Structures are given as structure tokens and as C-alpha cells.
Amino acid sequence: MTAQQEIVPIQSETPAIAALARTVEDLIGRGLDEQALTAAVRTELERTLAEGFELPAEQVAPDPVRYVMYPLHVAADGSFSIASAVWDVGQGTPVHGHETWGVVGIYSGVEVETRYEKPTSPDVPLVGQGTDEWGAGEVTVCCTTDDDVHQVRCGGDQPVVGIHVYGADIGTLPRRSYDPETGAVHWFTSRWA
């Protein structure tokens, strides 16, 4: 294991997140195709959010400078991770991809998501596919390996907190960001907060 692949220890995993992690691990172990897997994870995340749970204050705290991702669970083999992603009022991400599948459920606040067609060639302007708002309790499949480009931002007057489940350790995975006007690609890694 390289320093880049180091697993982040989780100090205070809540019972709800631990149960979700066990279910996701079981679903991955079934060998489902990506579409079936993300649909099943979506159902489980909807159930988890509907049942309600409290995250510790340090896992929902916004950073005044940029959005942050707190690790809630990282599989020992790096096969999936669960994060608390937090955007303060006025914050958002660049247009980016994930290089894996992902399911997002809103814990609190409002997230605005703008989707783009995944580019098939470099340096071509991106084509928008629309914008949606997601509120507390709503869940969406944010990405699959063939449909993977979006930008998200806080859409209300309070921070937005999302529970993100990804098919990799998202805190160590190299990913693409895009200039939507030119299609230029830059690689980045979303480091864990």
C-alpha cells in the first residue's frame, strides 16, 4: 500500500453509517452490474436518511474557504467510501468527474447540481444537461463511470451536507476537473478533511 492509498481511520462512525457500510459491502460482494448496484445503494441511502440519524458536529462543519469532505467510512480495501460533503453558503465545486460510481443523499440543506455530458474528446466545450435541486432526504445517483460530470453548490441560506457513497476511496482517487467553456482537463484529488 502506497502513501496515496493509506486508509483513513474513522474515529466516530455512527451506528447508521456502520449499518449502511455493511449493506454497501454486501451489495458490492454480490457482483451486481453498476446500474443495479447504484440503484440498490440509492434505496439503502434513502432508507437510512428516512430513519434519521445524527452526525457529530465535526462531520457537518463547513470550512469558511472551500467545500470539505469528511470520511465517515472507508473500506479497508478501498473498494468504497462514505463521506459527509459540506458546502457553506456561496460555495461550490468546479465542474468535475468521479472516475467511479456514486450515490448522494442530502442530510441537510439544499444542493444544486448542474450536469454535463461526459466529453468523448479533449478540449471541446461541455454540453449542459440541466440543473436540479436536491433537499433533505432526497437521493440521486450522481455518477456512473459512463455518466460522470457535474458541478454542485450550496443552494440555500444554510450549509448543505450530503452523504456521498462512492465506489472507491474518494479521498485518494485522482479525478478530472473541466473548464466547461473549453473542455480543458485538470487532474485533482479531493483530500479528506
Image (cartoon, grey):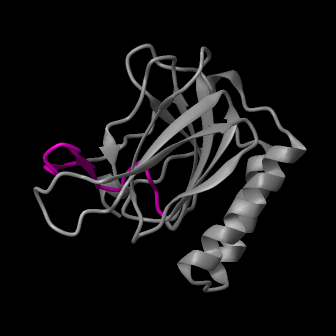
Is-magenta flag for residue 27? no
**Main secondary structure of the magenta stretch:** loop
Q: Position of residue 16 (x, y in %)?
A: 81, 48
Residue 146 in picture, x, y percent from top left: 39, 71
Question: Residue at coordinates 40% horizontally, 48% vertically from top-left?
Answer: 150
Q: Is residue 166 above or below residue 11?
A: below
Residue 193 locus on image (x, y percent): 46, 32
Q: Residue furthest right?
A: 51
Residues shaded magenta:
168-187
Q: Nearer the viewer, residue 54 or 42?
A: 42
66 in relation to 99, above or below: above
16 lies left or right of 82: right
Please identify the quarter of the rendering in which residue 13 is found.
top right
151 or 61: nearer the viewer: 151
Q: Residue at x 38, y 35 (%)?
A: 93
Q: How many marks?
A: 0
Q: Quadrant of residue 42?
A: bottom right
Q: Is residue 148 left or right of residue 121?
A: right
Report the residue at 63% width, 26% height from top. 60
Quadrant that contains the N terminus: bottom left
User: Measured along the vertical axis of the image, is residue 34 above or below residue 124?
Assistant: below
79 horizontally vs 145: left or right: right
Q: Is residue 184 magenta?
A: yes
Q: Is residue 160 left or right of residue 12?
A: left
Q: State the residue at coordinates (34%, 60%).
A: 117
* Residue 66, horizontal then vertical, whole percent: 39, 23
